[in-house]
Image: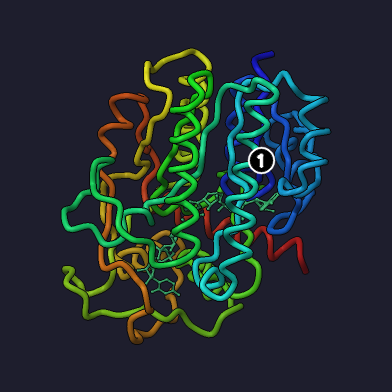
Amino acid sequence: MKEKILVTGGTGYIGSHTSVELISDGFDVVIIDNLCNSEAIVVERIEQITGKRPRLNIFDICDKGKLDRFFEENSDIAAIIHFAAFKAVGESVYKPLDYYRNNLVSLIYLLDAMKKYNIPNMVFSSSCTVYGQPEKLPVTEESPIQPAVSPYGNTKQIGEEIIRDTAVANQNIKAIALRYFNPIGAHPSALIGELPRGIPENLVPFITQTAFGLREELRVFGDDYDTPDGSCIRDYLHVVDLAKAHVIAVKRLIEGGSKKNYEVFNLGTGEGVSVLEAIKSFERVTGIKLKYKITGRREGDIEKIWADPSYANKELGWKTVSTLDESMRTAWKWEKYIRSISQ
Ligand code: NAD
Ligand code: WQD
């Protein structure tokens, strides 16, 4: 048995896939999640995939008393992977304090606990949202950070700064911030995947729900952008590839693979894909003709962005292996699975 890893938000979309990869690599996984955007049954699904059920502690990380009690019983944690956060960009505009409180108070309490209980390592979920609309593409880790367009995006920028300053002031705390581009797809078993509540904001869940008949049609937000087919471009990476990067990051921290005690990595495929290309990929792998129409632009949308993942390729020895088609295939398999069990 390898070290014990605390996965906050471990029953969520990326956290559940990462828990699978950690367990498969021999790590002992403990989860904290308050189930505000996920379900407890996910740990059973993780067990079905890996043969091991991670321990789930159900409470809010912003509850300092409960967090302290947790660490008193689990002071042997080798690293924290901190996924737990609110993530709906649109909602954050209407509920900024909820986002600042949940995403930043939780982070500060975890960093406090790292100091108090001598937990040396943290991996933090950051986002390509910190780059805004970059002037130069692809985006490297040196690309300038732009003023955030939403409170959600701001929590990621401030979160990174809080961690960096804490690591500077406490040389025995090491951290890696991972800036994800657009994670999509689901585990090939279709036992775990993304579970959006209500109407999805993100493209791929909207595509799969439309194909399933839950939504009338997909609206493509604009075809008058300065891109080859006029629709926006993103860097879509398979969630299992993303999950594997977390295992590598945790090992780098635990094994002292870097001399720096704060590092940042872009995690993407390095390829830009337009909305219309994403739809074509979905149609190709499923044989379904998707109902969609071109509408006006969505406020606040970035025109085009994709990663330069070469720093992660070189330093972490990580790169994506799944294709866009594979991501779409697993996203569709997952959509069919959740609908089959919720009927
Ligand atoms: P998710 O909502 O599926 O998972 C987050 C989990 O955290 C949920 O299970 C939720 O119940 C839990 N949680 C939230 N606040 C909590 C709290 N205060 N205490 C305990 N549990 C709490 O989201 P996800 O897509 O898996 O995202 C994980 C992380 O990655 C987030 O920090 C998100 O901002 C970041 N991120 C996500 C994307 C994306 O497109 N999904 C892109 C970039 C960054
Ligand atoms: C992708 C593309 C839309 C829905 C969000 C967050 C960002 C980060 C990643 C967390 C865009 C288009 C979408 C629809 C559409 N998350 N689209 N019709 O915009 O890259 O970013 O997720 O950190 O912070 O803002 O992802 O999936 O919403 O959109 O045409 O119904 O699909 O315009 O071009 P986005 P997305």
Q: Is residue 277 above or below residue 240?
A: below
Does residue 98 appear to the left or right of 146 in the view shown?
A: right
State the image quarter where residue 88 is shown: bottom right
Q: Is residue 30 above or below residue 140?
A: above
User: Dividing the image into 4 quarters, which one contains the N terminus?
Assistant: top right
Report the image quarter containing ligand 2. Answer: bottom left
How dense is the environment of label 1, judged by Cα within 10 Å: few (below 14), some, or many (20 and up)?
A: some
Q: Nearer the viewer, residue 283 or 324?
A: 324
Which residue is at a point 73% across and 41% down the rendered structure image? 32
- Provide the residue designation for mark 1: 109
| Residue 172 location (% of width, % of height) | 53, 18
Which residue is at a point 35% across and 71% down the rendered structure image? 301
Does residue 220 appear to the left or right of 162 in the view shown?
A: left
User: Looking at numbered disc 1 in the image, what kind of residue is underneath it?
Assistant: Tyr
User: Dividing the image into 4 quarters, which one contains the C terminus?
Assistant: bottom right
Which residue is at a point 65% across and 20% down the rendered structure image? 118
Does residue 267 appear to the left or right of 167 in the view shown?
A: left
Q: Is residue 139 above or below residue 337?
A: above
Element under disc 1: helix
